[in-house]
Image: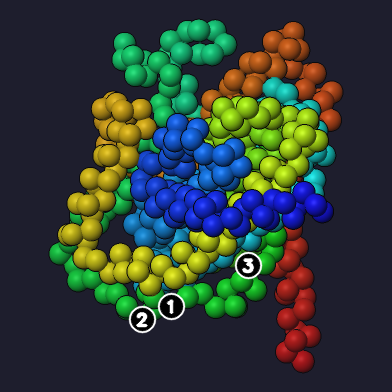
Amino acid sequence: MTDFVTALGYAFEPYTLFLIIASTLVGVLVGALPGLSSTMAAALLLPFTIYLPPVAAIAMLAALYCGGTFGGSITAILINTPGAPPAAATAFDGYPMAQRGEAGRALGIAAICSVIGGVFSLVVLLIAAPLLAQLAYHFGPPEYFALTVFGLSMLASISGNNATKNLIGGCLGVFLSTVGVSLTTGVERFTFGVPELYEGINFVPVLIGMFAITELLTQAGKLDREQRRNPVDAMRLPKLADFRRCWATIARSCGIGTFVGILPAEGGTIASMMGYNEARRWSREPKAFGTGVPEGIAGPETANNAATGGAMVPTLALGIPGSGTTAVILGGLIMHGLRPGPYLFQDQPALLYTIFVAMLIANLAFLVFGLFGIRFFARVSLVPARFLWPAVFALCVVGAYGVNQSLVDVYIMLVAGLAGYVLKQFGFSPAPIIMGLVLGSLVENSFSQSMIVFGQNWLLFFTRPIALVFFAFAVLGIGGAPMIRGLRRMWGRRDAPAVQD
């Protein structure tokens, strides 16, 4: 208790509190810019933190991490351009809702669900970090392979109503993930002598192209049509009924995001995809997803923000970063002479509590920024397309180039945008393609490493209990949810006559 009181004193010192709130605001703004993530902002900020006390420096980085994760949802909802990769799934239903003139409602749901997910994961971080870190420590290549198989099992149902097209799109994404030098064999694949492709295709330019450039081309064909927007509805905040409708989705995504965040190197992108897919999978009206339903925002936003606290668990308890931004935070800890790991819990408990309080303040701060800024942000949806989309295109070019400072990434973005536009005309969704690209390298590398460990005997996968659990989840995910929805419909039909009587 004494350590927690000490942490409160550190965090609420005027100078430290100012740094936390300022970092949160910077994180929100950076996260909202296409291609610029909290990882890049933290990396740029890291050299300047060397002049700060360790507590203030780490609290500042942690607050920026929280703000950046939420910030990506702003542009995802308003202009179908995820500011950060974890916000990609938010655009599936957030943007259609904004197009209906309900931008304020969508942004409000995103802000509140982000806080719920973030605070939940922080409670888990505070109470169960050592225990959960031990579980994550037992994950080897076979367990990661089983986890990615579980992720790939979602491809058929993650978006749209055509499972076959979703699977084709997912296979295309997995194929794109094979570009580059194989980490296991060292063989070059589909690089065509371009040095920038040796490390593979970065999914951020593909993400920007598939969402923003595709939407730009779509809007270009509608310039001669009159835009109809209701400015009153655009500024309207969500109602309590929206959250009553989404409570099961929020609770489910809290658990998904925290667990996936705890697993080293998984991060918020996969958590948000899983949160969205599970929301759709267990919904009574899965066909409504993609048209602008609250659950389609609540699922991914709760999950990707829950992953922030979860990702801090292996970072602090094991010295293994749970995401790209926590890798920067890990560097900050080492730079200030702090050794992450079990001894950190014994030697620096006040520092750990301060990180917890800083992230809690950051969540409350971006809730205030989000709710008070909704009326300002929502006006973006009222800007005529002929003025809005040229500015979006410029931001996309800057964002794609800023990932690796490479023009090749800009070309990849443009090609991905054109391909996305053509595929959209034939009923394909970008979601399975992006998910296949994200999971493809993970599933390939973890399978190759597992086969080396098993001596090329794949049957040994079934001797790993954790892997078996994920394989079972994959099977249940494919066939279990449709069966339960069918039972629900049968039960509803059985109850219908009784209700009429």
Looking at the rendering, which quadrant does residue 265 occupy?
top right
Q: Position of residue 129 (x, y in %)?
A: 77, 42
Q: CA distance from mark 1 to mark 3?
A: 18 Å
Give the residue at x 73% y 73%. 492
Assess whether mark 1 and mark 2 are in contact (beta carbons under 8 angstroms).
yes
Q: Which mark is nearer the camera, 1 or 3?
A: 1
Residue 369 versus residue 425 in the image, above or below: below
Front residue of this view, candidates 314 and 245: 314
Q: Which residue bears the numbered disc 1?
A: 236
Q: Which residue bears the numbered disc 3?
A: 246
Q: Which residue bears the numbered disc 2?
A: 232
Which numbered disc flags the more N-terminal residue, 1 or 3? Answer: 1
Residue 106 can be seen in this image = no
| Circle 2 Cα neighbour tier, 10 Å, few/some/many (<14 / 14–19 / ≥20) | few
Looking at the rendering, which quadrant does residue 200 occupy?
top left
Residue 476 versus residue 17 in the image, above or below: above
